Image (tube, helix red, strand yellow):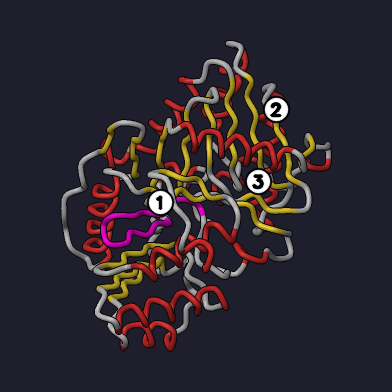
């Protein structure tokens, strides 16, 4: 993760980053340039080489007088040791950890530097996003934003920070301006994620490509995808052939079978793990962020998604999905064979 070239690179107001070197290089470079504040919120902040690299960087910036605030989810970041946390806290990092016992998880992945630059996507702070793991190389996407929407993202972090301290506060107002619209789970009475998913599917007129690591949507969503196909939309779902949790893997196979029966074009990435959460609609807009296509992300977790019509981002998303498709195939009968009955799977999926 050598970021020397990224530190001198000129970025656009919105830029989609899709390789480990560009994603982490840009984030490290922006943190190194910070002059006043660094705010980071991650579901997974692992106790591994990547996690320790960022922990040490945050400690160093805090010692330089920069205000550093970090929110991690207790369940997702359960590998973060007490020594790791104390090391940051002793150097002045304001670290809040959401309770590991909470049913709703802080699943957002975002960073805001000097309230001027934001990073939003599916990438956590862990080695697997850099070098892969037993599932192969991980493919993900992150949006670097440096426009007026960053102020709202910063206010959302302030809200999350107060919530993580157990304080009651008002949810920030929605943002929609120019090319960008922001969505987080607490908007519209907690219905923002299902409403966004419904809008994304219903607004497609020619093509809809969904990229997700965990394909466990409610049956109603699969039926919506089928209806979109019937009205002439080319519907495609791209996901990995295997996921990192066995019981979820079995549930996903059942969902794939349902989707294929409804006529949805499902493609499985072979030999790698697709972790991006993205929708490409009619080659005119991109929706991306932290939410998986599963019931937990749709209804329970704290998520953030960005809808953008920026042409550079749309073009980069098309390039990214085309690269993924080069290593995919339709599911075989084995890919759709599940052992766990559907009703049992639906009981488990909201808990995992």
Reading the image, the residue beneath label 3 is 251
At x 42%, y 62%, the residue is: 42
Badge 2: residue crowd in 10 Å (few <14, some 14–19, many ≥20): many
Nearer to us: label 1 or label 3: 1
Under tag 2, what secondary structure? Answer: strand
Q: In the picture, residue 222 is in which quadrant? A: top right
Distance Cα–Cα, label 1 vs label 3:
19 Å
Q: Which residue is mark 2?
A: 265
In this view of the protein, which residue sits in the foreground, 317 or 14?
14
Mark 1 and mark 3 lie on one chain; the one further toward the N terminus is 3
Residue 61 marker: none
Residue 245 relative to residue 217: left or right = right
Image quarter of residue 135: bottom right
Q: Which residue lies at the image location 47% right of the left edge and 78% below the top edge?
A: 80
Q: Image point 36% across, 87% down: which residue? A: 86
**Lateral position of residue 147 relative to residue 167, left or right:** right
Q: Is residue 241 above or below residue 53?
A: above
Q: Is residue 81 above or below residue 122?
A: below
Question: Is residue 77 within the magenta segment?
Answer: no
Answer with the quarter of the image where residue 323 lies. top right
Q: Which residue is mark 1?
A: 301
Q: Classify residue 43 as left or right of residue 206.
A: left
At x 64% / y 38%, what residue is drawn?
321
Say which element carries label 3. helix
């Amino acid at each position: 993760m050598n970021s020397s070239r990224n530190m001198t690179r000129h970025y656009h107001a919105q830029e989609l980053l899709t390789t480990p070197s560009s994603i982490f290089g840009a984030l490290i470079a922006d943190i190194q340039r910070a002059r006043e504040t660094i705010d980071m919120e991650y579901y997974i902040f692992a106790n591994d080489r990547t996690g320790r690299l960022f922990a040490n960087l945050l400690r160093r910036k805090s010692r330089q007088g920069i205000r550093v605030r970090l929110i991690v989810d207790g369940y997702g970041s359960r590998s973060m040791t007490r020594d790791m946390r104390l090391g940051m806290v002793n150097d002045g990092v304001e670290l809040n950890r959401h309770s590991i016992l909470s049913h709703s998880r802080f699943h957002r992945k975002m960073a805001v530097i000097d309230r001027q630059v934001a990073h939003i996507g599916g990438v956590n702070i862990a080695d697997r996003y850099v070098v892969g793991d037993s599932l192969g190389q991980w493919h993900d996407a992150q949006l670097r934003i440096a426009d007026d929407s960053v102020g709202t993202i910063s206010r959302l972090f302030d809200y999350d920070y107060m919530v993580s301290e157990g304080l009651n506060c008002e949810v920030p107002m929605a943002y929609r301006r120019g090319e960008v619209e922001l969505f987080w789970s607490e908007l519209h009475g907690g219905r923002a994620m299902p409403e966004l998913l419904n809008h994304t599917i219903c607004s497609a007129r020619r093509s809809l490509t969904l990229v997700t690591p965990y394909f466990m949507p409610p049956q109603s969503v699969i039926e919506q995808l089928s209806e979109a196909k019937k009205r002439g939309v080319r519907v495609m779902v791209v996901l990995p052939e295997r996921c990192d949790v066995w019981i979820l893997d079995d549930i996903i196979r059942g969902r794939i079978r349902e989707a294929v029966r409804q006529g949805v074009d499902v493609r499985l990435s072979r030999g790698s793990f697709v972790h991006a959460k993205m929708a490409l609609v009619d080659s005119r807009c991109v929706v991306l962020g932290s939410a998986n296509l599963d019931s937990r992300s749709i209804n329970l977790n704290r998520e953030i998604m960005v809808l953008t019509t920026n042409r550079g981002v749309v073009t980069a998303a098309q390039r990214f999905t085309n690269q993924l498709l080069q290593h995919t195939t339709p599911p075989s009968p084995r890919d759709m064979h599940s052992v766990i009955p559907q009703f049992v799977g639906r009981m488990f999926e909201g808990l995992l």
